[in-house]
Image (spheres, rainbow, N blue to C red):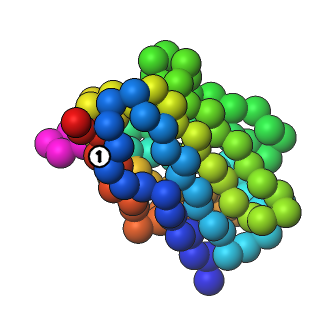
Amino acid sequence: QVQLVESGGGLVQPGGSLRLSCAVSVSIFSIYSMGWYRQAPGKEREMVARITIGGSTNYGDSSVKDRFTISRDNAKNTVNLQMNSLKPEDTAIYYCNIVRSGYIYWGQGTQVTVSS
């Protein structure tokens, strides 16, 4: 059974940083891609960043690419999202996502709130 467990969310002031981590219960080498999505109140879920098994990355928005960095820790079976210079508009529930053997799996989400 594939399980994804996110951690690292919380409340941070504008300009601050957070690091999200997603622990995956299966070998990271069996996963085609890993990513982070977010959903703000009243909005659709959107991709924040993805990283493939080959290490290629792509980001969903140009402003995010300048401030966020996605990475993968093969030894720990985790995918991480370093978020710097956070803005109030980054407030959302952040979800971990993996694509493995043609299936898509989601974590339960972690709340990120950027507010003074």
Is 89 or 38 nearer to us in this picture? Answer: 89
Q: Look at the image and give the residue range highlighted in magenta.
A: 40-45
Q: Please give the residue where the numbered disc 1 appears in the rendered image.
A: 113
In this view, which residue lies farthest toward the left? Answer: 42
Is 104 or 5 nearer to us in this picture? Answer: 5
Whether residue 92 is visible here, answered yes or no, is no
Image position, residue 44 (x, y; %): 26, 41
Question: How many marks overall?
Answer: 1
Q: Considering only vertical position in the picture, is 59 above or below 50?
A: above
Image position, residue 60 (x, y; %): 49, 28
Residue at image position (69%, 60%) is 78
Q: Quadrant of residue 88?
A: top left
Which kind of residue does numbered mark 1 sit on? Thr
Asked if residue 74 lies left or right of residue 45, the reply is right
Q: Is residue 109 magenta?
A: no
Q: Quadrant of residue 41?
A: top left
Whether residue 5 is visible here, answered yes or no, is yes
Residue at image position (74%, 49%) is 72
Image position, residue 107 (x, y; %): 47, 65
Q: Quadrant of the C terminus?
A: top left
Q: Quadrant of the N terminus?
A: bottom right
Q: Quadrant of residue 68?
A: top right
Q: Residues within 10 Å of mark 1 (few under 14, many from 20)?
A: many
Residue at image position (62%, 33%) is 69
Asked if residue 73 lies left or right of residue 45, the reply is right
In this view, which residue lies farthest toward the bottom? Answer: 1
Tell me which secondary structure the magenta stretch mostly adopts.
loop
